[in-house]
């Protein structure tokens, strides 16, 4: 039996689309929220699947519908991974650096979305020896082409660029020189996930070189000849906003910098 199928969940999402494009010409089975139930009930060709790339999730950090989050991010994931174990299919899946909250190396989720990622990571750790191969990737702050549909969940690179193109100015929280994130280009994410020889495990995926929101804003303003307008930090984000992120695990990879991405 020839194993040539790749199951890709979340193929219509920002990162999923990049995987789909990279896998052009491959036998890819796309699974989205709208067809997930049908897939669960009717897909029977597990013996032909050579890889599962699980990117699908409700990724909004402000979502408070716990039942929806658990059903989509946890229950479906566990079901999918049990099929991978049963049929000995390697798995590469998206976790999130949000599991760290405001720490750099301690599990401390600040929202329900992050909690669902912690639950999945713990389940994988408890069952890791049962997988043929399983790699979880705690994505840090991913940016790049194709973020239009993400709206408020888009990266600051995208949001700042859109604001300047629309109005000539970008809005930046006061004190943004103290907010540092590990920004990683989506093209680097896809390359690393698909092309690495690490064993089963859960890995940070970032550049390990944080950049402040202030610096990102200045780079975008320089690129598009715009101005920066400072606004107060919103109350509803107090205590739920990561002030610093930095990937602990280094990769033998030459990452695209924000400056290079903007072609400055």
Image (cartoon, grey):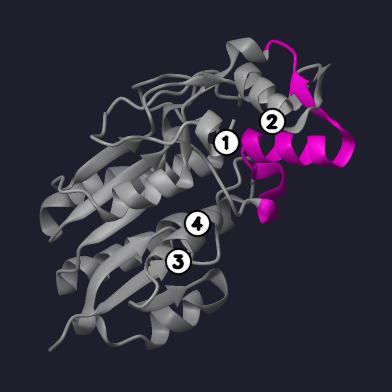
SS label for mark 3: helix
In the rendered view, tell whether residue 45 sits above or below residue 254: below
Dot 3 crowding, Cα within 10 Å, few <14, some 14–19, many 20+: few
Boundaries of the magenta span: 148-175
Residue bearing the label numbered 1: 263
Q: Earlier in the sequence, mark 3 or mark 2?
A: 3
- Of circles 3 and 2, which is in front? 2
Q: CA distance from mark 2 to mark 1?
A: 8 Å
Give the residue furthest to the right.
167
Number of the label disc, if any, that sits on residue 21: 3
Dot 1 crowding, Cα within 10 Å, few <14, some 14–19, many 20+: few
Q: CA distance from mark 3 to mark 2?
A: 27 Å
Determine whether label 3 and label 2 are within 8 Å by CB.
no
Residue closer to the observer: 216 or 33: 216
SS label for mark 1: loop
SS label for mark 2: helix
Residue bearing the label numbered 4: 57
- Of circles 3 and 4, which is in front? 3
Q: Earlier in the sequence, mark 4 or mark 1?
A: 4
């Amino acid at each position: 039996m020839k194993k040539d199928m790749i199951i890709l969940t979340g193929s219509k999402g920002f990162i999923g689309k990049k995987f789909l494009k990279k896998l052009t010409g491959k036998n890819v089975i796309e699974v989205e929220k709208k067809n997930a139930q049908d897939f669960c009930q009717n897909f029977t060709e597990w013996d032909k699947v050579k890889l599962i790339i699980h990117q699908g999730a409700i990724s909004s950090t402000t979502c408070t519908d716990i039942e929806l989050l658990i059903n989509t991010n946890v229950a479906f994931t566990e079901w999918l991974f049990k099929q991978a174990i049963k049929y000995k299919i390697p798995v590469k899946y998206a976790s999130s650096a949000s599991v760290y909250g405001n720490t750099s190396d301690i599990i401390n989720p600040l929202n329900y979305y992050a909690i669902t990622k912690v639950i999945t990571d713990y389940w994988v750790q408890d069952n890791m020896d049962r997988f043929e191969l399983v790699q979880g990737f705690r994505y840090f702050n991913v940016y790049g082409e194709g973020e239009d549909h993400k709206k408020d969940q888009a990266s600051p690179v995208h949001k700042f660029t859109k604001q300047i193109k629309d109005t000539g100015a970008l809005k930046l929280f006061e004190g943004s020189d103290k907010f540092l994130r590990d920004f990683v280009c989506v093209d680097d994410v896809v390359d690393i996930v698909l092309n690495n020889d690490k064993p089963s495990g859960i890995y940070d995926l970032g550049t390990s070189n944080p950049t402040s929101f202030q610096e990102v804003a200045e780079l975008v303003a320089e690129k598009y000849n715009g101005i920066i307008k400072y606004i107060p930090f919103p109350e509803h984000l107090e205590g739920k906003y990561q002030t610093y992120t930095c990937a602990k695990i280094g990769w033998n990879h030459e990452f695209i910098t924000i400056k290079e991405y903007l072609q400055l």
